Image (cartoon, grey):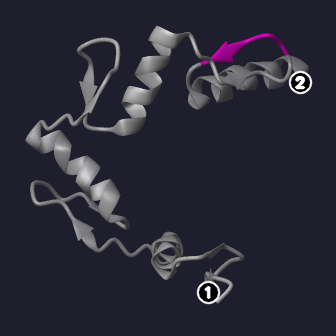
Amino acid sequence: QDGYKCRFCSFTARQRGNVISHERRHTGERPYQCRFCPYATAQQGSLNSHERIHTGEKPYKCRWCSYASPRKETVKIHERKHTGEKPYKCSVCTYATTQRWNLKLHERRHLREST
């Protein structure tokens, strides 16, 4: 088996479960329901992360300080404050940032300047 293909687009994956999860983007199906509020999602991992908002669980810890978060990605971004890592770099100028969103906002300024 080479992999599994999405019924709606060209997405493929080696594991069937990944394609099933992906296809929910097309169908809008959200089978995972929060126990505490109306939130529902297409992926079990997203539900687990969301429910930590209600439980207060913060399993992800910064390696350098006491910061903790319910989301792994949030700690990763936070740790860049300690390391100085700025992986998102502007293709027009020397600006660099710790978060992809900040780079997108920055690059929009260049687009406005050129119009």
> In what quadrant of the picture does the C terminus appear?
top right
- From the viewer's side, name the closer residue of 14 and 40: 14
> In what quadrant of the picture does the N terminus appear?
bottom right
Considering only order in the chain, which callout, 2 or 1, is on the residue closer to the N terminus?
1
> Which secondary structure type mostly characterizes the magenta part of the structure?
loop
At label 1, the amino acid type is: Arg
Q: Is residue 96 magenta?
A: yes
Q: Reply above or below: 35 against 86.
A: below
At label 2, the amino acid type is: Thr
The local crowd at label 1, few if under 14, some if 14 to 19, many if 20 or more residues have their Cα within 10 Å, is few
**SS for dot 2:** loop
For the point 18% across and 44% down, the residue is: 52
User: Is disc 1 in contact with disc 2, using a CB cutoff of under 8 Å?
Assistant: no
- From the viewer's side, name the closer residue of 109 and 11: 11
- From the viewer's side, name the closer residue of 18 and 99: 18
Residue 62: quarter of image: top left
Left or right: residue 95 versus residue 29 is: right
Q: Is residue 47 magenta?
A: no
Alpha carbon separation for disc pair 1 and 2 = 40 Å
Indicate the position of residue 69 as horizontal and vertical percent values. Answer: 27, 30
**SS for dot 1:** loop
For the point 10% across and 60% down, the residue is: 35
Check disc 1 and report the residue beneath it.
Answer: 7
Check disc 2 and report the residue beneath it.
Answer: 115
Left or right: residue 30 versus residue 5 is: left
Residue 73: quarter of image: top left
